[in-house]
Image (cartoon, helix red, strand yellow):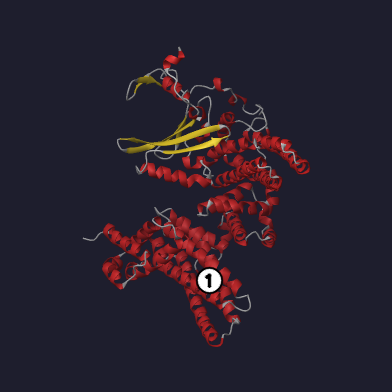
Amino acid sequence: MINDKSIEDFLFEYILKLSVGSNTRQEFEKYKEYLNIANIENINSVIDRFIETQNDFDLIEVTVSKFIRACEKGLERNNHYVTKNPYLELLLEENFRLEKHRANTSKIYKDFALGYQKAKNNTIPLTLKNMILEFNEIRPHYLKLQNSLFPTLEQYLSNMNCLKLMWHIQDGVLNDLKALLKVVEISPLDFKEFNKLYGDMYFKIGNLIYRERNILFPLVESKIKGEELYKLFKDVEVLKTSFNVNLSDFYGGKNMSESINNSQKRKEELNSIIKALNESGGSISVQKEIKKDFKKLLDTLSAEEIAEAEQALIAEGVAVEEVQKLCELHVDTFHEALKSASKRIQNGNEKISGHPIANYRAENKELKSQIVKFKKSFKKLKRTKDFTDFDKTLSNLSLIDIHYTRKENQLFPYLENVGFTGPSKVMWAKHDEIRALFKKIKSASIDKNIQECISKSKALISQLKRMIFMEEKILFPTALRKLPESAWIEIRRGEAEIGYAWIKPGNLWAPEVVYERNEKPSNFTTNIENELINLSVGKLSISQINLMLTNLPIDITYVDENDKVRYFSQGTERIFPRSEGIIGRDVQNCHPPKSVHIVEKILDDFKAGKREVAEFWIQMNNAFIHIRYFPLFENNIYKGVIEVSQEISRIRALEGEKRLLDEA
C-alpha cells in the first residue's frame, strides 16, 4: 500500500536525480506512478525538504521547476482550482492578465527577433519597448504575495522554504526587468544581452504563473479560512492591483480607507520607501524624490517605525550584512525625520542621572569631546611625525568599546525579550566595523604608517558620529517605548559588571538598585542554602556549590539543550564581560552576527554527536585565552553545552617542575 510517506520518499529521490542532471525519459517512467498521484501537500513537502539540502538558489530554481512540471498530471487531478474566494479571485485575475500580456509580448518579440536575424535591424520597435515597460504592472501583484499573503500562510506551515523560493524567483523577474529596461534604451541594441534577459524573464514569469495557480492558491484555500483571507483586502488599497484589475469587482465594502488601520498604512508606506531606497543603489536623486513624495509621512515618522521596518527586512530573509550596508542609507534619508522624532519622545526618567539611557548619553557626550581631541592628535601627527600624543588619544578613544559591550550584553537582551531583534543585530555588526577600524589604526601606528593612520582615523570618526546619531535618534527612543520600568531596573543592576566608558554614573534614578557587589542580596533563601544535595559523588549544599563555582580559576557558562544561556560563573577575574541580562538569552544572540553561523555549526555537531570538544585560543593584549566548548549528555540525550575559558599565559610559561614538597 502506498502512503504519503512512501510517495514523498520516492519523489525526493526523483528531485535529487533532477538536481544532478538525470532528466531522462527512463528516469521519469521509473517514478511516473508516484508523480501522477502526488498531491499539493506531497509536492510542497518534497520541495521544502530538497531546499534544505541545497545552498545554490539558481540550481534549486531550475530543479524545482522541472520537478513541478513532472508532477503536472498529479497537480491537475488534485487541484481544488480556486474560484470562490474573492481575494484569491482577484489574484487569479491578475495572474490571467499577466499571462495574456506575456503571450502578446511574446508574439511581437518573435517578429522582432526574426527580423533581426534576417536583416540585422537592431532598432527595437516602440510597441515592444512599451509592452516590456508594462511588465512593471507585475510589482503590486508580487508585493501583495510577499507582504500580505505569504506572512498569513506562514502561520499554517511548518516550513517556509517554498515561499522563500517563490520570493527569490519574483526578485529574479524584477531584476531581469530592470536590466532589460536599461538595455532597450541603449543604441545600438545589444541583441544577445536583450535576448538572454527577455528569455530568462519570460521563463520565470511562466514558472510563477503555473506555480500560483496549481500550488500556491489551492494550498492557501485549503489552509486559510475565507474570512481571514477577506481581511487581506485591507492591504490591497495600499499595495494596489495589477494590470488595471478593478478592486470593487471583488471587494464591495464602502469607505475602505476608513477600515484600514492608519498605523498599518504607515507601515506599508514606510516599507515601500525602504524597498525603493534599497533598489536605488544610494542614488541622491531617488532620496530627494522620496522626501518630496512622502513628506507628510516623514514629518511624523517615529524612530520605532524605522527600526521595525529594518527588522521586517531581516524577517523577510534579507541578510543582516545587507541590512547593515543599507542602514546608513536609511539614516541619511530619514535624518531630518529622526531629529524631530526624538524630540517627541519625552519619558522624563531617561534624563535623570543614573538611568541607563542617561548613562549611555553621558558617554556619548564624552565621546564627542574625545573625538575633538583625537582629530587634533592626528593633525599634530601629520605635522610632527611624532606618534606619542596620537597613540595616547587613540587608546583613550578606544574605551568606547565598553559602551558598545554594555549595549550588547545589557540592553540588547531585553529588547530581544520583547521581540525586537533585527536592529540590535545590525548595530552589533556596526560595532564590529568600528572595532576593526581601531585594530587597523593601531597596526598602522606600530608600522609608523602616518598616511594609513590618518585615512583610517577619518573613517573611524565618521563611523563613531553615525553610531551616536543611530543611538540617540533610533535605538534609545525605541528602547524607551518598548521596555517597562522593571526592565530598566534590571539593566541598571547589571551595568557595573561591565563598566562604563569615561563616566561615573549618578544614582538619582532608582537609587535602591545601585549597590556594591558585596551588598548584593543573596539569590538563595537561608532555609535551603545549607541543605545537602546528593551528587554523583558526595554531597554539597547550594551555598558550597555556588562558592566553588565562583572561585574556580576559569570562567564557565552553561547553555541548555534549547540553546538558552542558563548560568555563568562570577569569578573575581572575568575574562569576557557577562551580566545577568544574558540569562535566558538565545546563545546565538550572544555572538556577533558574522560568527553566528559558526556557533550554530558547533551546536549542530554537538547535538549530532559528531565532536566532543571545540576549542579556540586568542591573544588579548598581554593575555593568552584558551576557550573550550563541551557537549553535555545524560542517558545519551543532549542536555546542553558548557563553555570554559581560561587565561593561560602563566601556564604556558611554566618550565621544569615544582613539587608539593618544594613549598616546605
Residue 335 % position (x, y) = 69, 51
In the foreground, 135 or 16: 16
Residue 243 % position (x, y) = 54, 72
- Residue 586 seen in the current view: no
Q: Quadrant of the N terminus?
A: bottom left
Residue of label 1:
245
How crowded pointer 1 is (Cα within 10 Å; few <14, some 14-19, many 20+) is rated as: some
Q: Residue furthest right?
A: 383
Q: Residue furthest bottom?
A: 119
In the foreground, 25 or 341: 25
Residue 307 % position (x, y) = 59, 48
Left or right: where does residue 177 sit relative to residue 286?
left
Q: Residue furthest left?
A: 1
Splitting the image into 4 quarters, where does residue 51 fall?
A: bottom left
Left or right: where does residue 13 sit relative to residue 551?
left
Tell me the amino acid under the disc marked 1. Val
In the foreground, 191 or 542: 191
- Residue 360 seen in the current view: yes
Residue under the image location 52 percent in, 47 percent down: 594
Q: Quadrant of the C terminus?
A: top left
Left or right: where does residue 123 sit relative to residue 545?
right
At numbered mark 1, what does the secondary structure look like: helix, strand or loop?
loop
Left or right: where does residue 156 sit relative to residue 427?
left
Residue 131 % position (x, y) = 56, 77
